[in-house]
Amino acid sequence: MPKARLLLIEDNPRIQLANKDMLELLGYQVAIAMNLAEARMSLSKQVPDVVVLDIMLPDGSGLDFLRELRQYTDLPILMLTALGTTEDTVRGLSLGADDYLAKPYDYRVLAARVEALLRRAGKVPETLTKGALQFDLLANQVFLNGKDLLLTKKEFAVLLFLVKNEGRAFSSKHLYETVWKQSMVGDDGAVKNTVYRLRKKLGAFFSIQYDTNEEGYIFESFSD
């Protein structure tokens, strides 16, 4: 399944790297630009599915670039900015932005906004297939060789995240914060129990192992 392509235009290296890493973990293909010149170059080479655009850039205003883009494209554009007043938000939206997110923000909110833009544009796939596994992303169902595994919402979310990042290890804390969308307090029993149930339902076709070296859970396929 082709990955959705994002263009992230952000001049702060720390924010840029954090957003890029997070979005790639979620399965997106991310191109980056530190300024408007790099953004124009990137757009000339490949058209993304969503543009994430900072307002204050070293070689110009993101709002001016937004106005420029809207002269020839209706690509979904999400503005990221430290200018978070009502007037700034209204101005950005009136110039053609599809969404507007003020800094500081939770990375999960950014991810949700990007997915919402893709969904409106019809870019969010309805299914994902991994060997004998097929995900119905609209109904939150998973089928193994055509049989519904009857997963809970949390089981579905954990399995989908691990499948999208096959071969990479993720700690209980990371999984909890990604799926449960809150900080983990206390032990990791919720994650352990969810993984235990998934292992039973997946049987011998797939494996979710705990990598002691990486200190995290890792998804492996034996059915490809």
Image: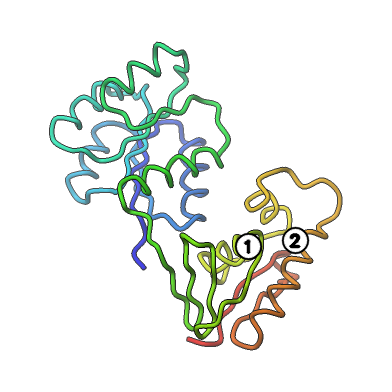
Q: Secondary structure at mark 1?
A: helix
Locate residue 3: give its quadrant.
bottom left
Residue 183 drawn at (x, y percent): 73, 43
Residue 196 left/right relative to 60: right
Locate residue 51: give its quadrant.
top left
Which residue in the structure is indicated by mark 2? 191
Give the vertical position of 40 relative to 207 (above or below). above
Give the vertical position of 143 relative to 45 (above or below). below
Residue 138 drawn at (x, y percent): 46, 59
| Disc nearer the start of the sequence (1/2) | 1
Identity of the residue drawn at 59% across and 78% down: 220
> Marks 2 and 1: in contact by CB < 8 Å?
yes
Quadrant in which the N terminus appears:
bottom left
Identity of the residue drawn at 68% across and 73% down: 198
Give the vertical position of 177 relative to 35 (above or below). below
User: What amino acid is at disc 2?
Assistant: Val
Q: Residue furthest right?
A: 186
Q: Disc 1 and disc 2: Cα gap in Å?
A: 9 Å
Q: Secondary structure at mark 2?
A: helix
Identity of the residue drawn at 64% across and 88% down: 204
Residue 166 left/right relative to 64: right
Which residue in the structure is indicated by mark 1? 158
Identify the coloring. rainbow
The total of numbered circles placed on residues is 2
Residue 14 left/right relative to 93: right
User: What amino acid is at disc 1?
Assistant: Val
